[in-house]
Image: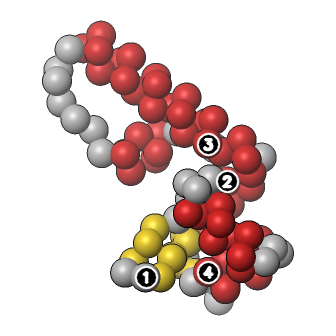
Amino acid sequence: MAQDVMTAKQAAEFLQTSRDTLLRKARAGELPAAKLGREWRFRREDLDAWLRAGGDRYEALVDTAMDEELRERMREDTGERIPLAEVMARSPA
């Protein structure tokens, strides 16, 4: 059974890359990840989306989604803040 949340070692195996490469990309914000204390965790769903988006192009998709959300909020002029997780959930995969 595939795990929904993976350790760095499991995520590196899933992506067929080294753990060092995976952690470097996670630290740089180039890979969808969350830090839990001193450990990194990776959601299989997020890594799948990252791969479908072409890997390194993922950051551009997130930036585009955030820009679109910001423009929409400015048009609405609600002043409401939106959590990053919600913006990312709306980003194209």
User: Tag 3 or tag 2, which sits nearer the N-term?
Assistant: 2
In front of the other: label 1 or label 2? 1
Classify residue 87 by image quadrant. Answer: top left
In front of the other: label 1 or label 4? 1
Q: Which residue is mark 4?
A: 8
- For the N terminus, give its image quadrant: bottom right
Contact (Cβ within 8 Å) of mark 2 with mark 3: no
Question: What x and y, as percent, mark residue 68?
Answer: 46, 23
Classify residue 36 by image quadrant. Answer: bottom left
Q: How far separated are the C-alphas under marks 3 and 1?
A: 23 Å
In this view of the protein, can residue 93 be seen by the observer? yes
In front of the other: label 2 or label 4? 4
Secondary structure type for disc 4: helix
At 27% across and 38% down in the image, what residue appears?
82
Amino acid type, mark 3 = Glu
Q: Which residue is mark 2?
A: 50
**For residue 48, above or below residue 68:** below
At 67% across and 53% down in the image, what residue appears?
50
Q: How far separated are the C-alphas under marks 1 and 2?
A: 23 Å
In this picture the colour scheme is secondary structure
Secondary structure type for disc 1: loop
User: Tag 2 or tag 1, which sits nearer the N-term?
Assistant: 1
- For the C terminus, give its image quadrant: top right
Amino acid type, mark 1 = Arg
Q: Which residue is mark 3?
A: 59
The dot on residue 66 is none
Q: Which residue is mark 1?
A: 38
Q: How far separated are the C-alphas under marks 2 and 3?
A: 9 Å
At 63% across and 35% down in the image, what residue appears?
60
User: Tag 1 or tag 3, which sits nearer the N-term?
Assistant: 1
